[in-house]
Each structure stands twice: as C-alpha cells, then as structure tokens.
Image (spheres, rainbow, N blue to C red):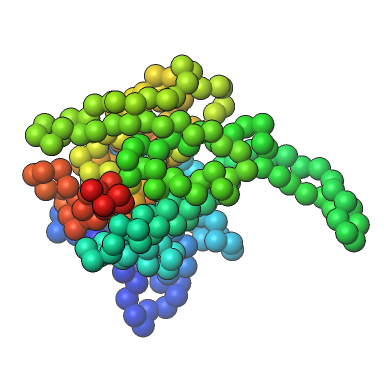
C-alpha cells in the first residue's frame, strides 16, 4: 500500500485545496497550504483517507477535528525542524551519537504536538513583580504516563520528563523474533492498573508490522486504559502497523514524523531509518 505525502504545487493560491490520487483509486487525500498539520484517518475498511480540519486562526489543529469512536487519527506535523531531524535520521552516514541526539529532539517536538489541548490545567492567581496575574498551570496531581518501548524508545522519550511538568515513566522491554516477526516481552514495569482518567504516551520509534505496538497497547488496555486515553509517538510509521492499530483501537491518536509506504520481507520499513536501536547505541 503506497501513501505519498501531500505536496502543495507552486503557483497555486494559498487557500486552494489540491487533490492528488495514488495508484490505488481507493486511496486519496487532499492538502491545503493553510492547514498547519496533515491528519490522516483509517476508516472502518482500513483505507487511508485524509481529513481537512476547519482552518484555525492559530497553529492548533487538534481541536478542529474531533475524534470519533470508530476512527483512528494519524497526525504528521509538517514542522521544518521535524523534517530536518528526520532527514538526519534517514542518512546512513549519521554517527550513533548524532542519531540518538536527533531522535531525542524529534521526540521532544512530537510529544509537544501530542500534548496540545490534552493536559489537565488548573487556574489561579499569582503575584508577579508588577502586580497580580491570572494564570494557568498544568495540574501536577495528574502525571502523564510515559511508556517507552525499549531500546530505541528510550531515545525518543529522553526529553519527555524535562519539559512535561509531571510524568511517571514505565519501561516496557519488547523484542521481535527475526524469523517470525512476533514480539515477546522481557521487561514490564507498568503498574497493575492505571488510575481512572490517566493519560499515557506510548513511545515506539518504528511502527512497521505492528506486532510490537499492538502487543504493548493490549497490555495497557488490560490495565484499564482506553484507546482515547493513549497517544502513540513514533518516528516512522507504515501502513501495516497503522491498519492493525485502527482495527483494534478505534479512537487512538498516532503522532509520527513520517509515513513510509513499504515494509519488506524482513519487517523493516523502506526507506525508513534502519534499525533505530542499533543506530542509537552503535551495536
């Protein structure tokens, strides 16, 4: 299944909508130069369709497109720094230290986007040097659960606790059999149950065949979370994984830097990044 990113043709009016057709007639999308993010959905038939949200005056697009119970949304923020970092990650000449640093910075940007209009807030008054101000803070009583899938998930999640005001990190170690491509869990530091109303970011850089991320979300839903309480953060996603997620977890939101069209017979995304864990740690 091939999916190409929308391209705004040069010379067209800023407000114009441009439609492109993929090789498969059932796969189509629209792009708008005025829309600040690209938002894809998977319908109940698991085919990519684009959704054009109402154009907002601010950069926020998540509030313009409500999530319904039968639809998974895939957010691909077209920020220039995200594009730059993904280019660094794609380059086979990027050394491990630089690769890991770029992965961490990419994670920071994607988590920032994912937390827009999602964190619980409290309001009050504080005394500034010049007077009393009405303010809002992220509620520290409701920490976000950060769940990196080891190994490479550690790099993508590295900065989460440095800029989110309240977090709890639960490590989840999963490995994939190179022959069967089936996942197995070797480390699970999640609690027995999550408190009601919890929010969780599941961080897995590569969504390829979908086996690992589906197994991880199965563990979370068994512990009391619903798909609408979970957001998935990835560097690269491919259609097989997104289709599996859509089939099992309606209402889920996925934030990814890019969607690549192919997963090869060895379970690697093409063109992808290669093995993100090996490239992060030089192994």
Q: Is residue 87 above or below residue 108?
A: below
Q: In the depicted view, which residue is nearer to us: 69 or 149?
A: 149
> Percent from the top left, x then y, of residue 234?
35, 47
Q: Quadrant of residue 7?
A: bottom left
> Percent from the top left, x then y, of residue 69?
42, 32
Q: Residue furthest bottom?
A: 11
Q: Which residue occupies 66% across, 42% down? A: 138
Q: Which residue occupies 58% across, 49% down? A: 163
Q: Can residue 235 be spotted in the picture?
A: yes
> Percent from the top left, x then y, of residue 185?
28, 26
Q: Is residue 65 above or below residue 169?
A: below
Q: Is residue 198 above or below residue 150?
A: above
> Percent from the top left, x then y, of residue 262?
16, 51
Relative horizontal placement of residue 146, taking residue 83 as reference (left or right): right
Q: In the depicted view, which residue is nearer to us: 117 or 140?
A: 140
Q: Residue furthest top?
A: 192
Q: Is residue 144 above or below residue 1?
A: above
Q: Can residue 233 be spotted in the picture?
A: no
Q: Residue furthest right?
A: 131
Q: Which residue occupies 44% across, 24% down? A: 190
Q: Quadrant of residue 71?
A: top left
Q: Which residue occupies 23% across, 48% down? A: 283
Q: Quadrant of residue 172?
A: top left
Q: In the depicted view, which residue is nearer to us: 147 or 261?
A: 147
Count numbered badges in the picture.
Answer: 0
């Amino acid at each position: 299944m091939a999916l190409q990113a929308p391209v705004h043709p040069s010379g067209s009016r800023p407000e114009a909508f441009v439609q492109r057709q993929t090789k498969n007639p059932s796969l189509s999308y629209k792009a708008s130069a005025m829309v600040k993010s690209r938002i894809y959905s998977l319908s109940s038939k698991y085919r990519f369709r684009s959704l054009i949200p109402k154009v907002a005056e601010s950069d926020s697009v998540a509030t313009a497109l409500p999530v319904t119970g039968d639809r998974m949304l895939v957010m691909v923020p077209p920020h220039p720094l995200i594009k730059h970092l993904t280019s660094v990650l794609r380059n086979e000449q990027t050394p491990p230290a630089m690769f890991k640093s770029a992965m961490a910075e990419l994670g920071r940007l994607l988590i920032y986007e994912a937390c827009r209009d999602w964190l619980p807030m409290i309001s009050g008054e504080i005394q500034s040097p010049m007077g009393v101000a009405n303010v809002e803070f992220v509620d520290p009583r409701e920490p976000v659960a950060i769940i990196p899938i080891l190994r490479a998930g550690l790099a993508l999640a590295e900065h989460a606790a440095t800029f989110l005001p309240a977090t709890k990190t639960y490590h989840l170690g999963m490995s994939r059999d190179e022959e069967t491509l089936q996942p197995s869990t070797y480390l699970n530091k999640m609690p027995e149950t999550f408190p009601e109303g919890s929010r969780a970011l599941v961080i897995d850089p590569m969504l390829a065949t979908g086996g690992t991320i589906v197994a991880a979300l199965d563990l979370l839903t068994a512990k009391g979370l619903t798909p609408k309480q979970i957001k998935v953060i990835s560097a690269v996603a491919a259609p097989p994984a997104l289709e599996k997620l859509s089939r099992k977890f309606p209402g889920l939101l996925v934030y990814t830097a890019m969607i690549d069209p192919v997963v090869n017979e060895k379970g690697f995304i093409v063109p992808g990044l290669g093995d993100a864990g090996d490239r992060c740690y030089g192994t």
